[in-house]
Image (cartoon, rainbow, N blue to C red):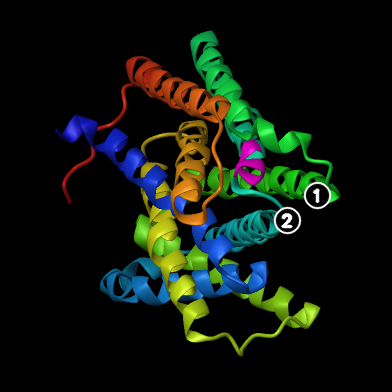
């Protein structure tokens, strides 16, 4: 059972993070306000656990503090850019560009950590990429400038989130994933706060329904990021990025159910191909590197 925990946690994270696009669609708040409150509320929820591990803060030196600040900046940019893209276009169109994340992660992992991927791993990534393209293909035919802007924002958000994960891959081992997540989330919240103040975006005046969405974002999708930070102790950024390819499938299905968005036969086939590619990747990764056993504590 222990040997399967990594895969199970990746599946849980995919399900949890798939709800993010739905919650953003439900909200009328600006993207940067959604992101900022999500981070602050997530920190609030982590306080009891972090308090029990407060001695770990003594391990954080200048280099670690700088890395946490930089990682928080990348995470803040990721949220703000992606949430903004969701305001401009459909869920499928926004998430399609995220399929480039494993490719960007492979390049970053090679440049920073000299990681190399086998031909089989590259093929499985390619299979999933084709599947995600099929999921979002229908939106590419829309003659709307907002779709193109949304695609551009989504690609910039890919670069930001890969930067966040690559920094975490090295620095999460310095402290527990709880303390690391708290520090990075707080850093992201502060960066977004600064942006909101500089841009003159109203910080208050949001009704109870909006605050419910803020809390939902802080609980469910953010749980996925805590899991990712924990798993970075055992697997690399490319593995995390590859598993996230399940998000467009989950988000599209949830959008059909909760938002009334239509799904085409092409998207159904694409979703199946994507999930097949992710499964093949995890199986291949397990055979090549052996996915780790995670202790119950």
Q: Which residues are magenta?
A: 92-96
Task: Give the image quarter of residue 119.
Answer: top right
Res. 106 visible in picture: no
Q: Residue at x 77, y 46 (%)?
A: 147
Q: Is residue 20 left or right of residue 142?
A: left
Res. 297 visible in picture: yes
Residue in front for this viewpoint, 100 or 96: 96
Which residue is under mark 1? 149
Our reading of the magenta stretch's main secondary structure is: helix
Is mark 1 in CB contact (under 8 Å) with mark 2? yes
Local SS, label 1: helix
Which residue is under mark 2? 88
Q: Residue at x 38, y 46 (%)?
A: 15
- Say if the magenta span includes residue 284: no
Q: Earlier in the sequence, mark 1 or mark 2?
A: 2
Q: How many marks?
A: 2
Task: Give the image quarter of residue 41.
Answer: bottom left
Callout 1: 10 Å neighbours few (<14), some, many (20+)?
A: some
Q: Residue at x 28, y 70 (%)?
A: 49
The location of residue 186, given as percent across then percent down, is 52, 71
Residue in front for this viewpoint, 275 or 71: 275
Residue in front for this viewpoint, 261 or 64: 261
Q: Is residue 50 left or right of residue 65?
A: left
- Quadrant in which the N terminus is drawn: top left
- For the view shown, which residue lies furthest in the top direction? 119
Q: CA distance from mark 1 to mark 2?
A: 8 Å
């Amino acid at each position: 059972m222990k040997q399967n925990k990594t895969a199970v946690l990746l599946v849980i994270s995919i399900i949890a993070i798939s709800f993010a696009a739905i919650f953003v669609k439900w909200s009328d708040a600006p993207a940067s306000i959604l992101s900022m409150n999500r981070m602050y509320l997530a920190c609030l929820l982590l306080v009891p656990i972090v308090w029990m591990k407060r001695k770990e803060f003594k391990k954080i030196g200048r280099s670690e503090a700088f890395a946490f600040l930089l990682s928080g900046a990348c995470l803040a940019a990721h949220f703000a850019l992606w949430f903004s893209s969701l305001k401009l276009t459909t869920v499928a169109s926004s998430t399609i560009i995220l399929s480039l994340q494993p490719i960007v992660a492979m390049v970053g992992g090679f440049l920073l950590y000299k990681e190399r991927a086998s031909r089989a791993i590259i093929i499985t990534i390619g299979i999933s990429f084709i599947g995600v393209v099929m999921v979002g293909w229908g939106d590419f035919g829309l003659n709307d400038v907002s779709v193109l802007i949304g695609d551009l924002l989504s690609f910039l958000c890919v670069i930001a989130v890969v930067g966040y994960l690559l920094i975490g891959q090295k620095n999460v081992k310095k402290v527990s994933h709880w303390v690391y997540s708290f520090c990075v989330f707080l850093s992201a919240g502060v960066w977004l706060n600064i942006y909101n103040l500089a841009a003159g975006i109203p910080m208050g005046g949001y009704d109870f329904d909006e605050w419910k969405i803020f809390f939902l974002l802080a609980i469910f999708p953010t749980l996925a990021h805590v899991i990712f930070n924990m798993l970075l102790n055992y697997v690399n950024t490319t593995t995390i990025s590859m598993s996230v390819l399940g998000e467009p499938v989950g988000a599209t299905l949830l959008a059909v159910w909760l938002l009334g968005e239509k799904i085409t036969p092409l998207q159904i086939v694409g979703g199946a191909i994507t999930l097949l590619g992710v499964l093949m990747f995890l199986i291949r990764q397990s055979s090549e590197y052996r996915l780790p056993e995670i202790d119950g504590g």
